[in-house]
Amino acid sequence: MELLQSMRVFSTLAELGSFTKVADAMEIGRPQVTVAIQELEAKLGIRLFQRTTRKVSLTPEGEEFFVRVNEILSSVADATTMFGRSGVALRGRLRLNIPAAFAQQNFLDALKEFSRTYPSVDLILGVTDRAVDLVAEGVDCALRIGELADSSMVARRVGTAVMVTCASPKYLEEFGIPRHVSDLSAHRGVNFLSGRSNRSLPWHFTVNGKDTTHAIRGTISVNESRAYVRSGVAGFGLIQAPGVTVDEYLSSGALVEVLADAKPSPRPVSVLYPSRNYISPQVKAFLDWVVADFDKLDPKWLKGQTT
C-alpha cells in the first residue's frame, strides 16, 4: 500500500481504535488495514500501536507520529483543493447526515449545485433527527439545528434557522388563538423529543426582548420532525418548528402562525465533523460551500452567520 494511504489508515485507526471500524469507514478489507499498519511499522522501525483483544492504542512513538501525520495529511488536503470551486481535483465520497428539517426541496436544489461544482464527489445522504455517532456510523459530517450537547466532535456554526409557532385552523377554532405568552396555560402543544434522553425540548419565546422558555401541556410527543409537523396539521396542538419545515403548510393555510410578536430567537445551525487535525478534502469543500451559500439554501427561513 502506498505511503500516503498507509498514513490515512494509521490516522483513522488512531481515532477509531478498531481495525474493523477502520475497514468499514474507509471501505477497504480488514486485512488491508492490518497490512498497512504492519508495513508502516516495518518502514519506520517502531511499534505504533499496543494491541490487546479489546483495545488498540497508540504507543508513545505512535503519539508523536500521529501529530506529524495529521500535519502532512492536512497539507495534502489543502493541496488537493487548491483549485477552489472548479471541482477538478476533488473526488471520492461524502457521507452527509441532515435533520429531516433540511430534507426539503429548497435544500436539495441547493445541494445539487454543490454536486455540479464537484461532479466526482459521490454524496451519501442520511436523514435523521436522532443524535448520530459520526465515527461509529462512518458519517463524514452532519448538519444540526439547535444548541449542541458537549461532545468530542468539532462544531462549526454556519447560520441560524428562523422558528415559528403555529397551529392548525381546526385547533384554533376549538381552543382559541393565543394572543400572549401568558395564554399558553390554557393551550395544548405537540412536544418534540430530542436526543438519546428523549426529553421534551423547551418552548422558546421572546418576552420584553429576552429569550424565555416555557412548558406547555402536551397531548402527544413526537421524536421525528416530519411527524411532529403533521401532528400539528392534524390538530393535536400548537407546534414550534423551524420555518423551513412548515413553509408549505403556512402557505396553504394548513397551519397558521401565532404569537408572532413573541417569535422565538433563531436557532443555531452547525456542521459537526470528527475532532481531528486532518479534515478530508470532501468535508472541507462542503464546509466552505455551506458557509458561503447558507443564505441561498432557503433565503426566507435560513440566515448566514454574520460574525
Image (tube, rainbow, N blue to C red):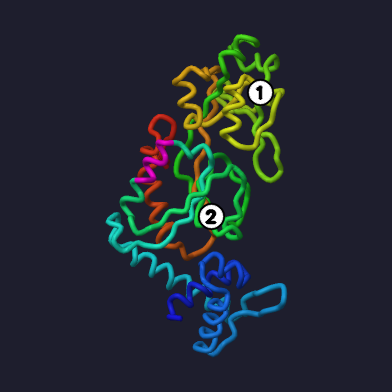
In which quarter of the view is residue 214 placed? Answer: top right
Give the left or right position of residue 148, taking residue 125 as reference: right
Relative vertical location of residue 130 with respect to residue 56 in this rendering, above or below: above
Q: Is residue 4 above or below residue 87?
A: below
Q: Which residue is mark 2?
A: 154
Q: Position of residue 110 (x, y in %)?
A: 37, 42
Question: Magenta span covers which residues?
Answer: 105-112
User: In the rendered structure, does residue 107 fall within the stretch colored magenta?
Assistant: yes
As shown in the figure, which amino acid type bears the numbered disc 1?
Gly
Please state which of residues 4 and 113 is positioned toward the viewer in this rendering.
Answer: 113
Q: Residues within 10 Å of mark 1 (few under 14, many from 20)?
A: many
Residue 180 in the magenta stretch? The answer is: no
Which residue lies at the image location 60% right of the left edge and 73% below the top edge? Answer: 19
Quadrant where the C terminus is found in the figure: top left
Residue 22 horizontal side relative to residue 161, left or right: right
Magenta span: predominant SS is helix
Which residue position is annotated with label 1?
189
Pinpoint residue 222: horizontal percent, then vertical percent: 66, 33
- Can you say whether 19 is above or below 151 in the image? below
**Location of residue 189 (image quadrant):** top right
Q: For the residue labelled by badge 2, is the local secondary structure a helix, a strand or a loop? A: strand
Count the marks: how many? 2
Type of amino acid under label 2: Val
Can you tell which mark lies on residue 22? none
For label 2, the crowd category at 10 Å Cα-Cα, with few meaning under 14, some 14 to 19 and many 20 or more, is some
